[in-house]
Amino acid sequence: MVGSVCTTRGIGEETPDRGAIGRPLKIGSLELTSNLLLAPIAGYCDLAFRLTCRSFNDDPAGEQGGLGLACTDLLSPHGLLKGTARSLDLAKTNDEDRPIGMQLYGSDPSIMGEGAAWAVEHGASLVDINMGCPVDKITKKDGGSKLLCDPDRALRIVESVRTAVDRASNGRVPTTIKTRLGWFDDEPVAEWLAPKLIEAGAMAVTLHGRTTAQKFRGHVDLPGIRRVVEAIDGRAPVIGNGDVKEPEDALRMIEATGCDGVMIGRGALSTPWLFRDAWTLQRRGSCPDCPELHARIELVRRFLELMRKHRGDRGAMIQMRRRISWFAKRLGPCRPLREAVRLAEDPESVHRALDAFLGGNLQPAPCRDEQGTGRGADRIDQPAAGAA
Ligand SMILES: Cc1cc2nc3c(=O)[nH]c(=O)nc-3n(C[C@H](O)[C@H](O)[C@H](O)COP(=O)(O)O)c2cc1C
């Protein structure tokens, strides 16, 4: 079997002060099993996918509990309070899906507070406020990253949500924010706003190291994240986010920025075991082997069955057709499989295609993407309403 794409190295040798490396994250009174979080990705990080990622938490090949916290996609407090089918579907969780962050977006402090109380009453282990979404549909209504342009409103939202969450949970559930470096490239608002948001009640800040103007272009700005870490100066944990596709990227994020945790989005879509690997690398200095091809196919099957359970066959097929390319990045050359899944009419046909792939003449796949670069996800459908 092909080994892992991680490099083995003695991380302690180069970094005598290991900082947050290998240290589980604590947010308020919420103690996580690691310092790694699954990002909200609207349309992707739903219950079935979160459970798929969590399934590696007790994998004996790696350090236990690599995925410390997963988060729902962004939720409309109006939708939750009205009980619309779409919002309830997006907020769906269960006992295995713990700890779970529920993320809210909006611009009205009092509705955000009511939505936050709803989230606590429906199982949220943490309530996160979206201050990073660059999508017009959200920013035109003054929500998402537009809040970086209206600091007073941003502060009032944090105060309102924190008060509501504390009341609903008896102070047990933390309130956090997820944001970007700023709106414009030359105005790093987060450097001065993030400390104020903490004073207003945010108990951790997740920082996507890009500006709203950048959307998803260019590379994550690690020095930019570092400046916010320095501005916050230990008053609350900072979670770095952006472009983590390999276990080493998570380590680099911590080393280069001094952040306390790392949130992973697109990298997990192709590599749901990335949390196991990045955590094991931090704790042991090397990664476990990539799951065998058979196990990677089982993972696709498990995801399909979870989708069927939580969204029905029709929903599962829609998701399977759009996601097979992501899974395929770690299945080696598999164009016929991708085509078969895209054309499949029902889940049984998907299982048959997976059987055929496993039993077929294709080379057993190395743990690399189809181009053989070892790189994971670097493209995604055009961000929909939720892209933050
Ligand atoms: C299609 C898409 C949807 C997203 N949806 C959300 C969302 O609902 N809430 C949020 O805070 N961020 C959202 N994001 C941003 C991610 O959480 C993350 O900050 C960003 O993708 C950078 O991290 P990554 O390089 O690890 O993917 C979305 C991103 C994409 C590409």
Image (cartoon, rainbow, N blue to C red):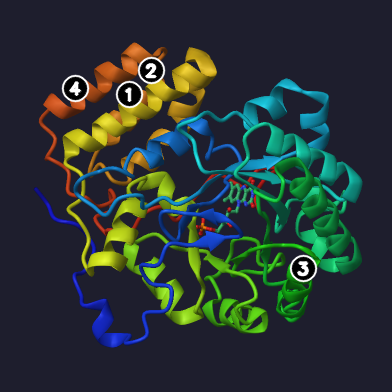
First in sequence: mark 4 or mark 1?
1
Identity, as a three-letter code, of the amino acid under mark 4:
Ala
Q: Which corner quadrant holds the C terminus?
A: bottom right
Q: Is the CB of the residue bearing disc 4 within 8 angstroms of ligand 1?
A: no
First in sequence: mark 4 or mark 3?
3
The residue singled out by tag 4 in the image is 356
The residue singled out by tag 1 in the image is 340
Of the numbered discs in the image, which one, if any, rests on residue 227? none
**Cβ atoms under marks 4 and 1 closer than 8 Å:** yes
The alpha-carbon separation of the residues under discs 3 and 2 comes to: 48 Å
The alpha-carbon separation of the residues under discs 1 and 2 comes to: 6 Å
First in sequence: mark 3 or mark 2?
3
The alpha-carbon separation of the residues under discs 4 and 1 comes to: 10 Å
Identity, as a three-letter code, of the amino acid under mark 1:
Ala
Is residue 64 shown to the viewer in this render? yes
- As drawn, 96 above or below 369: above
Label 2 neighbourhood size at 10 Å, few (<14), some (14-19), many (20+)? some
